[in-house]
Image (cartoon, grey):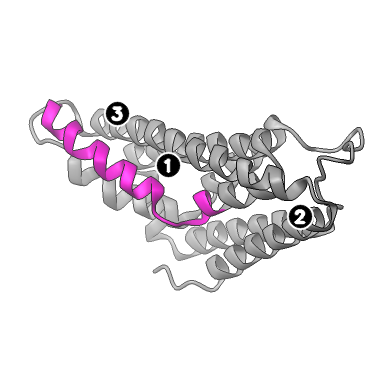
Amino acid sequence: MHAHTLLTFIPVALLLAFAPGPDNLGVLALGVSRGRRESLGFAIGCAAGCLNHTLLAALGISALIAASPLAFHMLQYSGAAYLTWMGIQALRSRGVSLNRPQPTGTDNGFKPYFRRGLIANAINPKVALFFLAFLPQFVVPGAWPAPLQILVLGLVFAVCSTLCFALIAIGANRIGAWLRGRERFALWLDRITGGLFIALGLKLAFSDLR
């Protein structure tokens, strides 16, 4: 691969990572409503999910899924259902308050939200189609084998996404920390977050992606 290819790819990847979408909107909402660990976990999970789509694109599996209406719609509705489930979980929450200790045994913390971010990204067909269309544009003919170039580009994109999502999570947490310190705001933050995830799930379910 040529150095100028990466120098062109990285700014585009950073710009796309910051562009409003389900991943960074979810990171933003969780940073405000839940806290830094949860939002960072979700952020890094979403970025790690990019590696899944990179591998599928490199192996040609994403193309097969896109060519199969049944497989594509199954993935689409699974992703929509998972986002909606996350929204319902947030709606059922009692809210995170800095003045009230969290009950033991809850699924708060980095790992549970890393897992949620990973799954939410990995089963989103819109991301699969994006990687299938986006990464090959930066493949240089006659350089490394195309699948290997796609893997490298996907890894770089995942790193860029991690940096962007982490900045969003940290910034949102600072705003959320002030709001969560006020009892009456704490519950509504989760309600808003839940509504956002449900809206994203419904949008994915009823989107005509084909």
Asked if the residue under mark 1 is in contact with the one under mark 3, i.e. CB atoms within 8 Å, the reply is no
Q: Nearer the viewer, residue 178 or 42?
A: 178
According to the picture, the residue beneath numbered tag 3 turns out to be: 152
Give neighbour class at mark 1: few <14, some 14-19, many 20+ (Cα, 10 Å). Answer: many
The three-letter amino acid code for the residue at tag 2 is Ala
- Give the residue drawn at x 91%, y 33%: 104
Q: Quadrant of residue 188?
A: bottom right
The three-letter amino acid code for the residue at tag 1 is His
Give neighbour class at mark 3: few <14, some 14-19, many 20+ (Cα, 10 Å). Answer: some
The three-letter amino acid code for the residue at tag 3 is Val
**Secondary element at image label 3:** helix
Q: CA distance from mark 2 to mark 1?
A: 27 Å
Does the magenta portion include 125?
Answer: no
Report the predominant secondary structure element of the magenta stretch: helix
According to the picture, the residue beneath numbered tag 2 turns out to be: 90
Q: Nearer the viewer, residue 115 or 74?
A: 115
Q: CA distance from mark 2 to mark 3?
A: 36 Å
Q: What x and y, as percent, mark residue 45?
A: 56, 36
Q: What x and y, as percent, mark residue 146?
A: 21, 34
Magenta residue span: 1-25
Please give the label number shown on residue 53.
1
- Give the residue drawn at x 14%, y 26%: 3
Q: CA distance from mark 3 to mark 1?
A: 12 Å
Say which label, 2 or 1, has the lower sequence index.
1
